[in-house]
Image (cartoon, grey):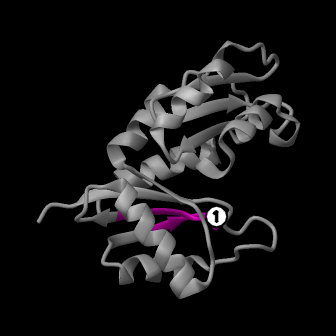
Amino acid sequence: MSTTRQIALLRGINVGRAKRIAMADLRKVLADLGFGGVRTLLNSGNVVFDCAARDAALSATRIEEALVLKLGVGSRVTVLDARQLDEVVQDNCLREMATDPSRLLVAIMSNPADRRRLEPLCHQPWQPEAFALGRWSAYLWCPDGVLASRAAAAMGNLLGDAVTTRNWSTITKLHALANAAGA
């Protein structure tokens, strides 16, 4: 049986005091669901795993349900396959302007159809910030930080929790982990 490499991004995990999950517990939950090669990155709900199912939405639903049942934590989960994560990396047209990868944010949409809702943001003047769209994500350059970002606030107003954000450093580390043999 062939497997697909998938990447799960849990929204709001281990940020502040709410939704605390040990990564060992998270790995066990996914392994108990039958996912193979489960690896976590950092302490904020980034998981790479192999799965027989090819439907990312089904994987996301199964993980969300298991988090509540096994760990008592509710979290929105977005799942991409390795090809989609490759496209997220390729589509980033803001890389060259970003002088600090921790302030270059990648917002992965739970529903790719939400991309249409974000299109008007591409035509607004955000300087010194920048906003761009890819196939699966939005890219935000926030030179003064995310808390001061008008573009991030506008995106949040449009999508709420239907998007989860990682900085460029985390995305590149996840990409490397997803493409590593035996991950």
Q: Is residue 10 visible?
A: yes
Q: Residue at x 35, y 61 (%)?
A: 58
Instruction: Name above or below for residue 167 compared with residue 77.
Output: above
Where does the image place residue 75, in percent across and percent down from the top left?
61, 67
x, y percent for residue 158: 69, 36
The secondary structure type at the circle numbered 1 is loop
Return the residue nearer the eye: 182 or 4.
Answer: 4
- Which secondary structure is most common in the magenta stretch? strand
What residue is disc 1 on? Answer: 44
x, y percent for residue 30: 42, 76
Residue 148 among magenta residues: no
Measured from the top left, where is residue 34 in percent x and y? 30, 78
Q: Amino acid at mark 1?
A: Ser
Give the side of residue 51 with respect to residue 128, left or right.
left
53 left or right of 134? left
- The C terminus sits in image quarter: bottom left
Query: 163 and 7: which one is in front?
Result: 163
From this viewpoint, which residue is outermost toward the left? 1
Q: Residue at x 64, y 64 (%)?
A: 44
Q: Which residues are magenta?
A: 39-49
Identify which residue, 38 or 183, lies in the foreground.
38
Image: 69 above or below 138: below
Residue 46 falls within the magenta-colored stretch = yes
36 versus 166 height, above or below: below
Q: Quadrant of residue 126?
A: top right
Q: How many marks?
A: 1
Q: Is residue 180 visible?
A: no
